[in-house]
Image (cartoon, rainbow, N blue to C red):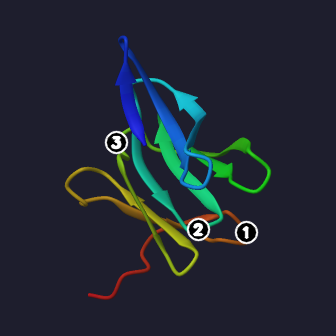
Amino acid sequence: LLAKVGGVTNLYLYNTYTEALTTISSGDAITGINSNGTHIFFIKDSQLYRYVIATSTLEMVKNLDQTVKNLYVINHWLYFGNETYTTLFRLHPDTLLIETGFWLS
């Protein structure tokens, strides 16, 4: 859940069992929120973050190009790009290396 309350924008995890909110991060520059079921990924201030749900820990994974806004999780790979998708990258799930040129033409 991304919500702005009292002028402050926060990213929350909502627990449907306890109906409780856990604050994950704060800031107006949060974009590209996505999840693979065990992690919540998002972009904030041109950095890729991963929130581990089981341990409630937040970690900065990678610095990204400042134009990157969109983020998708597909088969454990993270794909991200700018708003018009003219620049597209993917992050290897094990090595955390950023790859380009993986699409077919």
Is 104 in front, or is 60?
60
The crowd level at tag 2 (other Cα within 10 Å; few <14, some 14-19, many 20+) is few
Which of the marked residues, 3 or 1, is nearer the chain's N terminus? Answer: 3
Amino acid at dot 2? Gly
Amino acid at dot 3? Thr
Query: Which residue sits furthest left?
Result: 84
Secondary structure of the residue carrying tag 3 is: loop
The residue located at (62%, 71%) in the rendering is: 92
Is 100 in front, or is 4?
4
> In the drawing, does residue 88 fall left or right of residue 46?
left
Distance from disc 3 to disc 1, alpha carbons, whole Å, reads 23 Å
Secondary structure of the residue carrying tag 2 is: loop
Q: Which quarter of the figure has residue 94?
A: bottom right
Q: Which residue is mark 2?
A: 37
| Badge 2 vs badge 3, beta-carbon distance below 8 Å | no
Q: Which mark is residue 67?
A: 3
Secondary structure of the residue carrying tag 1 is: loop
Q: Which residue is mark 1?
A: 95
Q: Quadrant of the N terminus?
A: top left
Q: Quadrant of the C terminus?
A: bottom left
Which of the marked residues, 1 or 2, is nearer the chain's N terminus? Answer: 2
Q: Which mark is residue 15?
A: none
Distance from disc 1 to disc 2, alpha carbons, whole Å, reads 20 Å
Distance from disc 2 to disc 3, alpha carbons, whole Å, reads 26 Å
The residue located at (35%, 46%) in the rendering is: 69
Which of the marked residues, 2 or 3, is nearer the chain's N terminus? Answer: 2
Q: Which quarter of the figure has residue 59?
A: top right
Residue 102 drawn at (x, y percent): 44, 80
Give the number of the mark in front: 1 or 2: 2
